[in-house]
């Protein structure tokens, strides 16, 4: 156990985590040179294309360092983690499975929002933090300035003689020295194999042959093939079909000892039964042990509806395809939740819950690529807590579920704490942008001489749709942000209904603050007037709150020139034809209905 080192790499998106992991694999000869490829641990096509890690990946490496302990072989367990805020819970559980963390910072971009967020998570687990500045080979590297920023955020952590390493993961510069520092400074696991089994589940995946694979760090005891075990929080009981390590392919070892990181095959058919953060113990010891701390269920906070974009005659077939595709994705993504729903406008579909906007994008993109599904995705919304006057509380996931206003006592919505980091020269632009999200300013701090960090509180609904894009546009791509949920707060929220020819259209309804209802309603009806095809009768487009119309536009009728066949004669002949047309239009308006094409829904939802 003294020769085991468990560590992970934490950093902001695109700061070089996966590239550094590649160099470690090459240096330790874990992967043959002929099989090596960029982003080796990113196995998903979407990860390679976007250049981001979506699913964390553990790997076990063996390395001899001649300068230490007479060339003893050290076992290095590395976990390559995602950098995006949506997956921060998975990152926090990975950090609970290791003793050390490499804090990687890009020499061209400096400290970013997720750098600080992940550093905070690592400090909560009391990990040994090894700072490293990456990409020093690039022409735009500002190594000295970034070193000051790193010293600033680490503060007292550098007092113990920790030096900030300068590396190039792409070129391999300084990577061997970094590996030596990990072996010297990261402590070995302090676990006891004589104690009863306790193992932390830090991730899970689905295998067609072995069922659910639980990625575990054995804290105490040992686990062997054939053992009868139980998940202490979920209560699921299984027999271990197989146990092994990551090389990074699965390699069966039949057992895992205290301090080791590996997998166990459970044979389960649902990933939801094997939850991240749960504790595994032997069946006879369940009542005598305490679960490992820190478990919580990841709760989806962003909701959107998925509908198959198909012709009516294919609807049933494509609905079944979408249901099967979501079920298969859920096997490898326990945070995804979905339930059936139907809409008069869009047919049958599913209301889906996600951890954040990136999570939503990844799922929708995988459905399109892997299952060839064309989808209509509704505007993302957040979940609301509604307290009725009767005292009953309910969760509302869509505007259609909001009770009648006369029954509502108060509505609460999720709020987040925002950390925005950008160049000091863009401070004014950042403050102006943040003022548009109707939140509360908290504080401003400087990281070195040229970077500024702004703390802000805001409703989650203001952040999820396009705030990140606006942030990047306003600062030419130099700013970054992270957020964390801080609780629920009361607000004066109402349901904004959109009526087309006096009929409410469910797909256009949304929950908005009362003071923004008129502005939002006006934008939607004006957009509808532009894109809705003309009908044979005049159509009123209205935005209403609680039955009161707050905005209106009229779509004029398509008209036929009924007087074209007249050649001279008395004017009364012309008026008679026009009056007849007018009566016909009025009759159609009273009896007719508007069929809204699918393209109109798509354009409004994208808006």
Image (cartoon, rainbow, N blue to C red):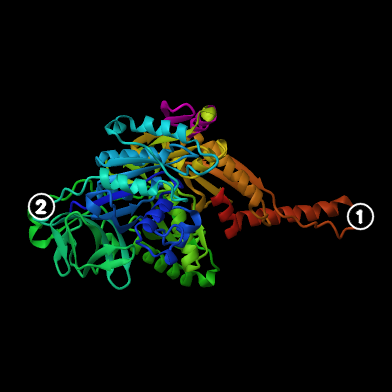
Which residue is disc 1 drawn over? 569
| Secondary element type, mark 1 | loop
| Location of residue 251 with respect to 504 vertically, above or below | below
In the foreground, 235 or 132: 132
Residue 246 image point, x, y percent: 30, 62
Q: How many marks?
A: 2
* Viewport quadrant of the N terminus: bottom left
Residue that mark 2 sits on? 289
Q: Earlier in the sequence, mark 2 or mark 1?
A: 2
Q: Residues within 10 Å of mark 1 (few under 14, many from 20)?
A: few
The residues bearing labels 2 and 1 have C-alpha atoms spaced at a distance of 102 Å
- Pointers 2 and 1 in contact (C-beta within 8 Å): no
Give left or right: position of 214 versus 596: left
The residue positioned 53% from the left and 69% from the top of the image is 312
Magenta-drawn segment: 428-457
Q: Is residue 326 above or below residue 129?
A: below
As rendered, which of 498 and 335 lies closer to the eye? 335
Label 2 SS: loop
């Amino acid at each position: 156990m003294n020769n085991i080192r468990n560590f992970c790499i934490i950093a902001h998106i695109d700061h070089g985590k996966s590239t550094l992991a590649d160099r470690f694999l090459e240096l330790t000869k874990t992967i043959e040179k002929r099989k090596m490829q960029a982003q080796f641990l990113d196995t998903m096509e979407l990860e390679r294309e976007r250049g981001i890690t979506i699913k964390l990946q553990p790997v076990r490496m063996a390395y001899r360092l001649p300068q230490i302990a007479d060339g003893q072989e050290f076992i290095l367990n590395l976990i390559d983690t995602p950098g995006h805020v949506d997956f921060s819970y998975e990152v926090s559980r990975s950090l609970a499975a290791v003793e050390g963390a490499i804090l990687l910072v890009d020499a061209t971009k400096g400290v970013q929002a997720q750098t600080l967020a992940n550093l905070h998570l690592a400090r909560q687990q009391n990990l040994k933090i090894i700072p490293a500045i990456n990409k020093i080979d690039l022409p735009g590297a500002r190594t000295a300035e970034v070193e000051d920023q790193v010293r600033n955020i680490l503060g007292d952590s550098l007092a113990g003689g920790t030096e900030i390493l300068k590396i190039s993961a792409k070129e391999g510069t300084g990577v061997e020295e970094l590996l030596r520092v990990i072996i010297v400074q990261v402590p070995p696991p302090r676990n006891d194999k004589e104690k009863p089994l306790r193992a932390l589940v830090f991730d899970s995946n689905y295998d067609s042959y072995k069922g659910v694979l639980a990625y575990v760090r054995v804290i105490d005891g040992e686990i062997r093939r054939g053992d009868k075990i139980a998940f202490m929080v979920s209560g699921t009981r299984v027999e271990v079909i197989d146990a092994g390590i990551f090389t990074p392919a699965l390699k069966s070892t039949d057992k895992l000892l205290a301090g080791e990181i590996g997998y166990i095959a459970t044979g389960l058919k649902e990933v939801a039964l094997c939850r991240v953060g749960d504790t595994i113990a032997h069946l006879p010891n369940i009542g005598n042990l305490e679960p490992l701390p820190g478990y919580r269920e990841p709760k989806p906070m962003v909701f959107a509806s998925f509908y198959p974009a198909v012709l009516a005659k294919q609807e049933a077939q494509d609905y079944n395809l979408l249901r099967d595709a979501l079920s298969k994705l859920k096997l490898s993504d326990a945070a995804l939740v979905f339930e059936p729903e139907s809409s008069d406008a869009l047919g049958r579909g599913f209301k889906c819950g996600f951890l954040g906007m990136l999570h939503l994008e990844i799922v929708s993109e995988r459905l399109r690529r892997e299952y060839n599904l064309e989808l209509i995705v509704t505007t993302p919304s957040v979940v609301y807590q509604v307290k009725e006057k009767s005292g009953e509380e309910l969760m509302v996931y869509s505007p259609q579920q909001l009770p009648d206003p006369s029954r509502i006592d108060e509505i609460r919505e999720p709020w987040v704490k925002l950390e925005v980091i950008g160049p000091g020269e863009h401070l004014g632009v950042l403050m102006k942008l943040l003022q548009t999200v109707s939140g509360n300013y908290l504080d401003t701090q400087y990281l070195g001489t040229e970077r500024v960090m702004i703390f802000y509180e805001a409703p989650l609904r203001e952040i999820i749709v396009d705030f990140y894009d606006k942030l990047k546009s306003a600062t030419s791509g130099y700013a970054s942000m992270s957020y964390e949920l801080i609780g629920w707060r009361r607000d004066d929220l109402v349901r904004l209904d959109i009526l087309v020819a006096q009929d409410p259209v469910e797909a256009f309804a949304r929950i908005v603050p009362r003071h923004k209802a008129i502005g939002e309603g006006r934008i939607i009806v004006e957009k509808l007037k532009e894109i809705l095809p003309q009908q044979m009768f005049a159509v009123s487009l209205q935005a209403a709150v609680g039955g009161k119309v707050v905005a209106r536009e009229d779509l004029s009728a398509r008209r036929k020139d009924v007087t074209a066949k007249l050649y001279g004669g008395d004017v009364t002949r012309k008026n008679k034809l026009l009056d007849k047309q007018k009566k016909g239009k009025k009759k159609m308006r009273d009896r007719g209905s508007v069929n809204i094409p699918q393209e109109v829904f798509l354009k409004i939802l994208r808006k």
